[in-house]
Every structure is written in C-alpha cells, then in structure tokens.
Image: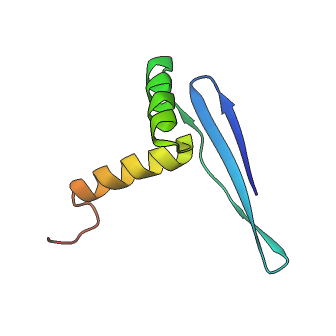
Amino acid sequence: MEDEAVNLGSVEVTSAVAHEGEKTIRKRKSLAVDETTYEMLSKICAERRRSKIQQLQVLIEAEFYALNLDGTDS
C-alpha cells in the first residue's frame, strides 16, 4: 500500500508495506523544489512512466555511483 501526497513544489510520501500480518511503515523525508524543477521532474516521470519518488531514486543512485561515493575503487 502506498499513499502519495504531493504539493506544488514539494513531494511528501509515506508508504506502508504489510509483512506477515504486521504493518511496517517506511518513513520518508519531505523535499521542496522550485516550480521549474518540479515541472521538469514531472515531465521526466511522464516520459519514463515512473513516480516522482522512483525517478528521484534512479537519478540520485546514478549520481551516487558516478561520484564513487560507495567507497569502492573501480
């Protein structure tokens, strides 16, 4: 189960995942961006058919590994 609350210029998502009769809640932080950035993200999401959270995860993960912030020497 996933609930998404989106305000213009910010994304705040709380998702809940049920495991074996127990409810585990994954908390997320709020993120505020300017309107131009928000609209660009929305267009990327529509093109890639991803939610804003999914798209941000993809972009952040790619940059994280491009900068070799995981500590591996490859």
What residue lies at 66% left-to-right and 45% top-to-bottom?
Answer: 13
Left or right of 35? Residue 72 is: left
- Residue 22 higher or lower than 44, as above or below: below
Q: Looking at the image, which residue sits at the far top?
A: 36
What residue lies at 50% left-to-right and 18% top-to-bottom?
Answer: 35
Q: Is residue 22 visible?
A: yes
Q: How many marks?
A: 0
What residue lies at 49% left-to-right and 37% top-to-bottom?
Answer: 45
Residue 70 location (% of width, % of height): 29, 66
**In which quarter of the view is residue 1 placed?**
bottom right
Rendered-image quadrant of the C terminus? bottom left
**In which quarter of the view is residue 73 placed?**
bottom left
- Residue 73 higher or lower than 42, as above or below: below
Depth order, front residue of 46/66: 46
Q: How is the image coloured?
A: rainbow
What residue lies at 56% left-to-right and 24% top-to-bottom?
Answer: 9
